[in-house]
Image (cartoon, rainbow, N blue to C red):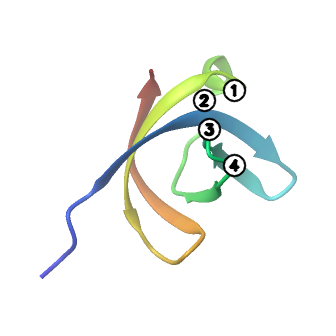
Amino acid sequence: MAAAPLRLHGHLRRNARGFLLEMDDGHVWRLKGAQDFPPLLDTAVIVEARKASSSLLDVLWLGPA
């Protein structure tokens, strides 16, 4: 049975390898499947995703918070 998607809030960042979700508690998630969202870079976002590993999220949806 697949795990239910997570709904997380944070700031969308980009590094040389891809997109990141930086959370207020300091945790940083790598985002797999995130498309290019230039208007949302460095802004607060909501991410719906499945946890792929301890640091990777498989993004289902990403939008403004």
Q: Position of residue 51 (x, y in %)?
A: 41, 68
Q: Position of residue 50 (x, y in %)?
A: 36, 63
Give the mark nearer the N terminus: 2 vs 3.
3
Element carrying mark 1 = loop
Confirm or deny contact between disc 1 and disc 3 (CB under 8 A): no
Q: CA distance from mark 2 to mark 3?
A: 20 Å
Q: CA distance from mark 4 to mark 1?
A: 17 Å
Q: Amino acid at mark 3?
A: Asp
Confirm or deny contact between disc 2 and disc 1 (CB under 8 A): yes
Q: Position of residue 45 (x, y in %)?
A: 51, 28
Q: Amino acid at mark 4?
A: Gly
Element carrying mark 4 = loop
Q: Amino acid at mark 2?
A: Phe
Q: CA distance from mark 1 to mark 3?
A: 16 Å
User: In screen coordinates, is 15 left or right of 61?
Assistant: right
Q: Which residue is identified by label 3?
A: 24
User: In screen coordinates, is 18 left or right of 56?
Assistant: right
Confirm or deny contact between disc 4 and disc 1 (CB under 8 A): no
Q: CA distance from mark 3 to mark 4?
A: 5 Å
Q: Amino acid at mark 1?
A: Leu
Residue at position x 54%, y 48% in the image: 34
Single out the mark in the foreground, 2 or 3.
3
Residue at position x 12%, y 82% in the image: 1
Q: Which mark is residue 37?
A: 2
